[in-house]
Image (cartoon, rainbow, N blue to C red):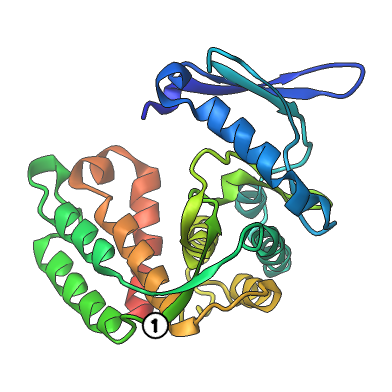
Amino acid sequence: MNPEARSVFRLRHTDGDLALKLDLDGAETHRPTREFDTLTRLKPAFAGTKQAALINPVWCDPENLGLITKFVSGPTALRSATEDPSGENLTLLGARGAQFLNTLHTAEPSEEIGYWPDWVLKRLTALASKTGARTPQIGADACTRLIQRFRQISNAQRGTPCLKTLAHGDFHGGNLIVADAPTGLDMTEIRRKLGLYDAVDYLTSLDIQRPDLDTALTDMGLHPALDEAFTATYEHALPRDVLRCAMLGKWLILTFKITQARHAASRFQRVKLTRLQARIAHMT
């Protein structure tokens, strides 16, 4: 996937502004058509609530190079958390994310399946095996120790019943507009999987923006305001111990992905690693 192949433009119009998503890889990936079809299919589920919304599809290029939707004003949750990481704002953002997922995760029938974290262990092992400049900055010994610790924690949660739902698939804070009704963006990765992974993606993407390392963390490595607001607002079954395990897996993956090369080249990556290490140390 080439991220540079996709761009979004605001089109000014007297009848209401539009958003044009240009996708130069669309002819091969068919992302514009998939997203248009998804937005159209989910319209009824979101039409019945004022607590959440989707962008409104208008037109899809028959050659799959673009998609036009109605423009929705407002900052993304990621931008809001970056500009104001206060407890008050994190409370708002936690609730907004849960409100959106409440609707999405019931848009189609759910089913109960077991939690199996083997894919996380495979991912961590693959990242830890990189060599040279792609070696994780924390070093091989630390990677081995953390993989062993995750295996111990995750073994206790294997098979725990969880809900498999229609999930966003890429629900980071940049894909939610904080408006009167939180509005979801970029529905190209939507698929059926454990709904808890949408929660993990959203919460980690917001909390890692916080510069404050002195704030007390919850058992999931989160600011208490963000954690409490999300879990209090989310309406579906979400086993706390499994969610905590999945959160730790996400923090570890993000940590292992900071390679020696990235650490040396980017101050942002160095700061991010410090924040990640604080969360992992608290949880392990």
Decide: is 156 above or below 28. Answer: below
For the residue pair 31 and 70, the one nearer the viewer reads as 31
For the question of whether residue 263 can be seen, the reply is: yes
For the question of whether residue 210 can be seen, the reply is: no
Looking at the rendering, which quadrant does residue 55 occupy? top right
Looking at the rendering, which quadrant does residue 280 occupy? bottom left
Q: Residue furthest right?
A: 14
Decide: is 71 above or below 164. Answer: above
Q: Residues within 10 Å of mark 1 (few under 14, many from 20)?
A: some
- Dot 1 corresponds to which residue? 160
Expressed as whole percent of the image width and height from the top left, the position of residue 118 reads 24, 67
Total numbered circles: 1
Where, quadrant-wise, is the N terminus in this rendering? top left
For the residue pair 175 and 138, the one nearer the viewer reads as 175
Residue at horizontal 73 percent and vertical 68 percent from the top: 88
* Direction from residue 192 to residue 267 in the image, left or right: left
Expressed as whole percent of the image width and height from the top left, the position of residue 57 reads 72, 31
For the residue pair 25 and 9, the one nearer the viewer reads as 25
For the residue pair 263 and 131, the one nearer the viewer reads as 131
Decide: is 32 above or below 184. Answer: above
Q: Amino acid at mark 1?
A: Thr
Decide: is 263 above or below 4. Answer: below
